[in-house]
Each structure stands twice: as C-alpha cells, then as structure tokens.
Image (tube, rainbow, N blue to C red):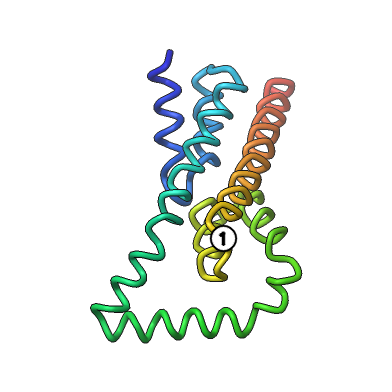
Amino acid sequence: MLASELHIFLISMIPFSDLKFGIPYGLHMGLPLVSTCIFAIAGSIVPAVIWLAIADPLTKFLRKHSKLMDSFFTWLFDKTRKNHSKNFLRYGALFIILFIAVPIPGSGSISGASIAYVFGVDFWKSVALISLGVMIAGILVATGFESITGLLHIFF
C-alpha cells in the first residue's frame, strides 16, 4: 500500500499538476482520503521548499556569469517590485496563500514560491505561507472531487 502513497507523493511533486492531479488520482485508486491528502500535500510542498532554497544562489550565479541574465533579473525585480510592492506590502501574505490555494493550472506551490522570492519574503515565512496555501488547495481539491464523484454516482 505504501507504494501507492509514494506514487501520489511523486505525482504531486510535478509542477502545474501537483496535488490537483495527485488527489483525484489517489482517490480514484481507492486510497483513503486522509492518507491521499497527506501525501499529496507533502509532495506539493517539497519542490517549493527546494526552489526557495536554490532560487537565491541560482539567481546570483546566473547574474554573475551572464550579462543577459543580470539584465533580465534586474528588470524583473525592479519592475515587479516597483509596480506591485505597495499592494504586496498590504496583501502579500494573503495573496500568496490565495494564489496557491485556488486550484487552477499555474497557481501551485512553485509559482507561489517564485512570487515570494521575487518580493523578498523571508524563507521560513514563505514556507509557512506556501504550506498553508497547499493545505487549503488540498482541501478544496479533495472536497470538489468527492462532491463530483458523489453526484455522478447518484445520476449514473
């Protein structure tokens, strides 16, 4: 049985599908809801934490070794922070949580980690915000999947 949970964990690590695919897959396989959600949530958080850990050293390396990348990151950070820092200071934590929590393509934990990095959010605060957003997304996906399959069983 643990091999099935490992599948859910690994599927949930894939960017852009993450737990949005991992939870329905696990429930479709007949795994218990709680263990499916735990492994999917953990699988979705791990790559975001890894990305947060390597983003700064990677960016510094690229900026140091490439003028093009230095220009790109200077443009990205300056433009993003200039245009959105006022709103981000006001709603930043809530924005990151909601961005990750809404289960639409492209709004996963790695995208949220990238936003947190660009705005210079502290590592541990980012991890906490991402974890909360992923947990909310997991609840939404599991509830939605269970509701839809329940309705389908009623009518078919």
Residue 7 sits in quarter:
top left
- Bin the neighbour count of mark 1 within 10 Å (Cα to Cα): few under 14, some 14-19, many 20 and up: few
Residue 111, percent across and down?
51, 59
Residue 17, percent across and down?
48, 46
In the image shown, does 110 or 152 lie closer to the viewer?
A: 110
| Quadrant the N terminus occupies | top left
Residue at (59%, 50%) from the top-left corner? 130
Q: Residue furthest left?
A: 65
Q: Is residue 72 above or below residue 138?
A: below
Residue at (64%, 39%) from the top-left corner? 135
Q: Is residue 59 left or right of residue 66?
A: right
Residue at (32%, 80%) from the top-left corner? 69
In the image shown, does 28 or 73 lie closer to the viewer?
A: 73
| Quadrant the C terminus occupies | top right
Residue 134, percent across and down?
60, 44
Number of residue marks: 1
In the image shown, does 106 or 135 lie closer to the viewer?
A: 135
Q: Is residue 33 above or below residue 74?
A: above
In the image shown, does 111 or 77 lie closer to the viewer?
A: 77
Residue at (72%, 75%) from the top-left corner? 87
Residue 43, percent across and down?
47, 37
Q: Is residue 19 above or below residue 114?
A: above
Q: Amino acid at mark 1?
A: Asp
Element at label 1:
loop
Q: Is residue 96 left or right of residue 71?
A: right
Q: Is residue 23 above or below residue 33?
A: below
Say which residue label 1 marks. 122
